[in-house]
């Protein structure tokens, strides 16, 4: 088991390194696709079922729909997603790679001072999350 975990951690390092670029740079679509593919495979290999991560993706969708009406509330909910990820990961260890990636992405979304830039970065985070889900399903992950 330990060897498998080290392999997964080694695989996750390059993904974590690219997350800031994926979220901040609109021109990094090719990197987004490559890293989502890799993370989808890692999550499937760790045995993550979509139902175990569904509440996180549902929360992201709720934040997305809230943003146009109440951007300040949406930003607050992005902040509060980090402790929720910690809690969910403790209950579901297979969620850890996704939580690690989302934590880095959330910090990158929140980094700019302008709400407009935060919104643009959040939109790229949503694209990344959608691609991760698609690849997870492609590799046989599901319920």
Image (spheres, rainbow, N blue to C red):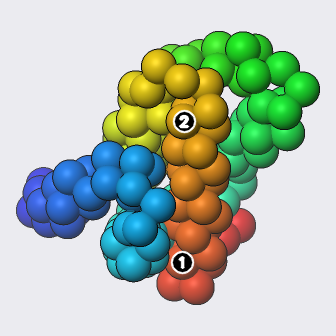
Identity of the residue furthest to the right in this view: 69
Note whether 137 is above or below 96 in the view shown.
Answer: below
Residue nearest the viewer, comparing 56 with 7: 56
Quadrant of the rendering where the N terminus is positioned: bottom left
Note whether 138 is above or below 121 in the view shown.
Answer: below
Image mark count: 2
Q: Going 70% across and 67% down the picture, which residue do you hit? A: 143
Which numbered circle lies on residue 135? 1
Q: Going 47% across and 19% down the picture, which residue do you hit? A: 113
Q: Is residue 71 left or right of residue 117?
A: right
Element on which disc 2 rests:
helix
Residue nearest the viewer, comparing 106 with 84: 106
Q: Is residue 134 left or right of residue 33?
A: right
Q: Is residue 93 left or right of residue 136?
A: left
Element on which disc 1 rests:
helix
Inspect this view and state whether residue 114 appears. Answer: yes
Mark 1: few, some, or many residues within 10 Å (few <14, many ≥20)? many
Q: x, y percentage for residue 58?
A: 77, 43
Mark toward the start of the polypeptide (2 vs 1): 2
Q: Going 85% across and 39% down the picture, which residue do you hit? A: 65
Residue nearest the viewer, comparing 80 with 6: 80
Which numbered circle lies on residue 117? 2
């Amino acid at each position: 088991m330990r060897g498998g975990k080290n392999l997964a951690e080694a695989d996750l390092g390059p993904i974590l390194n690219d997350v800031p670029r994926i979220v901040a740079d609109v021109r990094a679509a090719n990197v987004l696709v490559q890293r989502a593919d890799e993370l989808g495979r890692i999550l499937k290999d760790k045995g993550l079922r979509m139902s175990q991560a569904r509440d996180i993706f549902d929360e992201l969708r709720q934040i997305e729909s809230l943003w146009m009406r109440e951007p300040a509330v949406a930003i607050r909910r992005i902040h509060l997603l980090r402790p929720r990820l910690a809690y969910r990961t403790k209950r579901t260890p297979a969620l850890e790679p996704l939580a690690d990636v989302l934590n880095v992405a959330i910090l990158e979304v929140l980094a700019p001072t302008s709400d407009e830039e935060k919104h643009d970065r959040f939109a790229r985070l949503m694209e990344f999350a959608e691609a991760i889900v698609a690849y997870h399903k492609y590799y046989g992950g599901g319920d």
